[in-house]
Image (cartoon, coloured by chain):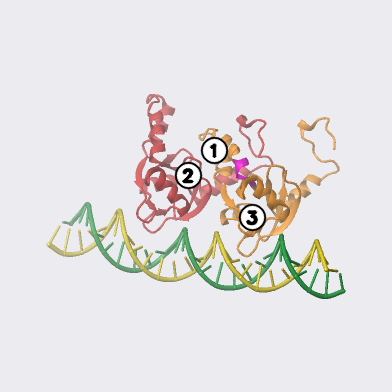
Chain colours: A red, B orange, C green, D yellow
Amino acid sequence: MFRGATSLSLDAKNRLAVPTKHREALLHECGGNLVLTAHPHRCLLLYPQAAWEPIQEKMMALSSFDKQSSALQRLLVGFAEDLSLDSAGRLLVSPVLRDFAGLSKEVMLVGQGSHFELWNMDAWRAQLAQVMQGEQFAMPAELEGFSL
Amino acid sequence: MFRGATSLSLDAKNRLAVPTKHREALLHECGGNLVLTAHPHRCLLLYPQAAWEPIQEKMMALSSFDKQSSALQRLLVGFAEDLSLDSAGRLLVSPVLRDFAGLSKEVMLVGQGSHFELWNMDAWRAQLAQVMQGEQFAMPAELEGFSL
DNA sequence: TAATGAGGTTGCACCACGAAACATTTTTTT
DNA sequence: AAAAAAATGTTTCGTGGTGCAACCTCATTA
């Protein structure tokens, strides 16, 4: 299970040095074979390849005539790239994906259990601010009666 | 059950020396394995690892396409870090979490039953002041008919 | 009341990780 | 084929995390 947020910077060649605490887990789980793709919320998703496959299956099983479905397919499958950790535990982020998520030098890598999200630092902060805005933060209806 | 508020200060390396009265309980309950994460109210949550897992489960079961749900996931799971008490009963607070909660040297550790909250001292005072503001503090509807 | 011991706290030194710069190899283009 | 650009690999430096150890405080006992 991947947890925790790490502030990182892309190097001059747009490579992301994965924190060592996660490297071992990634190498172990998938031999360093990963999938990086786009998320509707303008961040990137980083999955171990094995974990990604069933998700892609599920997406492509949806009707490609439905506007909503095909839009999601184009995003999630269309942007998906196979990549692997290099000898120094880094991975190269393509211009297309960088552009999509607006990544500049400073980025935030956020563990989300089965996968990671990769954010432009400003976008991350903006999204945070939004949750905490207001006296009382929004609680999804499914969590009725749930407390921390 | 964790109770009581303790004023503490982070050391030069940003470690928090857990009060001895709580150390034993923490070691006993979870072998010193803890999870520290972010709370929407700009404080940090400190859970025994075992107590945290079911909460994370519940969060990750929500839809990651829904804005509210995913925002909560990003906050609670995205910031969650595994840590453990060192030999001197201290725990290291990462830069990311310190930054999130605006922790400087003076902090307040507040027992909340199953877990603790960790506050920036000023934020803590501000939040206190808010409750006590006014002659009569607001009573949640769920507490109808309840009295201290 | 003084001495001894245990537990707690603080400071110090070492080690590991991340960032950046540098070096080398491979590919593409003219 | 040569040169430039892209990709991959290596090294170094600085910061930050970790563990150890000395010191201080408090409690206990004679």
Q: Position of residue B44 (x, y in %)?
A: 64, 49
Tell me: C25 left or right of A93. left
Q: Nearer the viewer, residue B146 or B11?
A: B11
Q: Residue at x 73, y 52 (%)?
A: B124
Q: Which residues are magenta?
A: B46-52
Q: Is disc 1 in the same subunit as disc 3?
A: yes
Q: Is residue A19 visible?
A: no
The residue that disc 1 covers is B70
Residue flagged by tag 3: what amino acid is it? Gly
Question: Could you say which disc has been placed on residue A117 in the image?
Answer: 2
The residue that disc 3 covers is B102
Circle 2 marks a residue in which chain?
A
Where A96 falls versus D13 (above or below)? above
Q: CA distance from mark 2 to mark 1?
A: 11 Å
Q: Position of residue B113 (x, y in %)?
A: 72, 42
Q: Position of residue D11 (x, y in %)?
A: 36, 68
Q: Nearer the viewer, residue B148 or B29?
A: B29
Q: Is disc 3 in the same subunit as disc 2?
A: no
How packed is label 2: few (under 14 Cα within 10 Å), some, or many (20 or more)? many
Where A95 falls versus B87 (above or below)? above
Residue flagged by tag 1: what amino acid is it? Ser
How packed is label 1: few (under 14 Cα within 10 Å), some, or many (20 or more)? many
Please give the count of numbered marks on the rendered protein. Answer: 3
Image quadrant occupied by the C terminus of chain A: top right
Q: Is residue B51 magenta?
A: yes
